[in-house]
Image: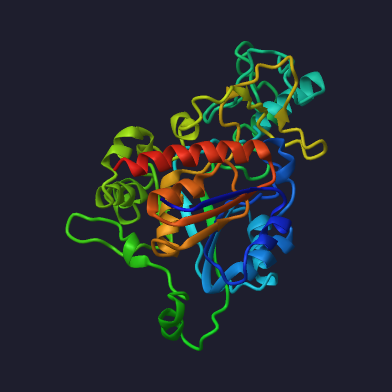
Amino acid sequence: MTSVNLMNGDSKEMLKNLEDNSIDLLATDPPYAISFMGKKWDKALPDIDIFKECYRVLKPGAFAFVMCTVRSDVSSRMSLLLEEAGFNINFMPIYWTYSSGFPKGYNMGQSAQKKLTIGSARRKDRDLKDQKMTRNRWGDHTSGVKANTGGQVELTLPESKELENAFGGFQPKPAVELIIVAMKPMNKKTFVEQALHNKKGVTWLGNCKVPGDDMDRLPSNLSVSDNALGDYSKYFDLDAWWSKRLRETNLEDVEFTFPFLEVKKPSKKEKDSGLEDFELVDGGVYLGNNDSKNNNTFSSDPSRVIKKKKNPHPTVKPIKLFSYLVTLGCNPGGKVLDPFMGSGTTGIACVLEGREFVGIDMDEKYVNVSRARISHFSNLKQKE
């Protein structure tokens, strides 16, 4: 049975319980400093002391896969943060592309029409206490959150017509996330000497080949989900790799249990597997555009319709993505660290791929969710 160690507390302090040079891989999805859904923990980049502790506990030549938004201000700062902590960052990042993101562009034509006619860019029916309000969707030219009643504002003024196809700033439909690749410097002179010494300084690209009709291909620094590139997806197909991986590891029952693996972002079923006995809790309502003054992207207003969830974590990543990273980063039996564990996806990947796992989260609620989810998948693994 795979060793799983879950800790509740500040990673900067909890990591001090781990020995020097004892971890084979760091795989994590830390806060991005974009105040996602108004979450307090996502308002700043991680404390550099956490990454310094991660550096200490990693073995010489061990790799780190750190997820990050592609926003230039955040990705550059995250990379430099890792470098300042001691990591070598002179590697290609991995780009993960998908088709299920939704945009938050603010339509300037609509906004200008409302601003010039009623003195405010906010629609009269955009009442934040209106329980019928829903998220804006791609292709709907109304701005922000829209009500079911009201419809599109007609552009009658020349000033608003001139801005009909303009959107505030640059907020296209998101389709890519970044995975920064870093390494703790080696303690041997060459890669081959390091590999012979402790099997580090390497990534296991041969275990992550993309299956093809005629031959398997070594992976590139692009992984594709949802057939996002059409016919070209076959060269970068994360879904195809995962399906083959399940067959190779005799996990067909898991594949049958998880039809959600055919889609990019984790479905409700994937997020809630193992949480059948958990109570539904408030998941909150995402309001669309960021209010930089008040950080008010996420409403806890009791008059709003709050979506109930068993797993309320807002940034759950797919199991197949972290299974890929775990396979790429270390061999079976290796020990993987995630100091920003969230709801436990990295731990699930470790259980399925036969790696030991150390996970830390400061929120006890998410530690409990992680424990239940990991236990569920561990039980499935034992039945294979």
* Lateral position of residue 212 relative to residue 366, left or right: left
Residue at position x 18%, y 54% from top?
A: 213
| Whether residue 158 is visible | no
Residue at position x 67%, y 56% from top?
A: 74
In the displayed structure, 37 sits above or below 325; it is above
Placement of the C terminus among the 4 image quadrants: top left
| Whether residue 269 is visible | yes
Residue farthest along the bottom direction in this orientation = 189
Instruction: Name the foreground residue: 162 vs 81.
Output: 81
Instruction: Name the foreground residue: 383 vs 168.
Output: 383
Residue 296, quarter of the rendered image: top right
In the displayed structure, 181 sits above or below 185; it is above
* Lateral position of residue 297 relative to residue 165, left or right: right
Spot occupied by residue 264 in the image (x, y as percentages of width and height): 42, 40
Residue farthest along the top direction in this orientation = 149
Residue farthest along the left direction in this orientation = 214
Instruction: Name the foreground residue: 22 vs 33.
Output: 22
Spot occupied by residue 118 in the image (x, y as percentages of width and height): 79, 19
Residue 173, quarter of the rendered image: top right
Spot occupied by residue 163 in the image (x, y as percentages of width and height): 66, 34
The image shows a total of numbered marks equal to 0
In the displayed structure, 261 sits above or below 189; it is above
Spot occupied by residue 144 in the image (x, y as percentages of width and height): 66, 28
Q: How is the image coloured?
A: rainbow
In the displayed structure, 345 sits above or below 147; it is below
Instruction: Name the foreground residue: 149 vs 24.
Output: 24
Residue at position x 69%, y 56% from top?
A: 14
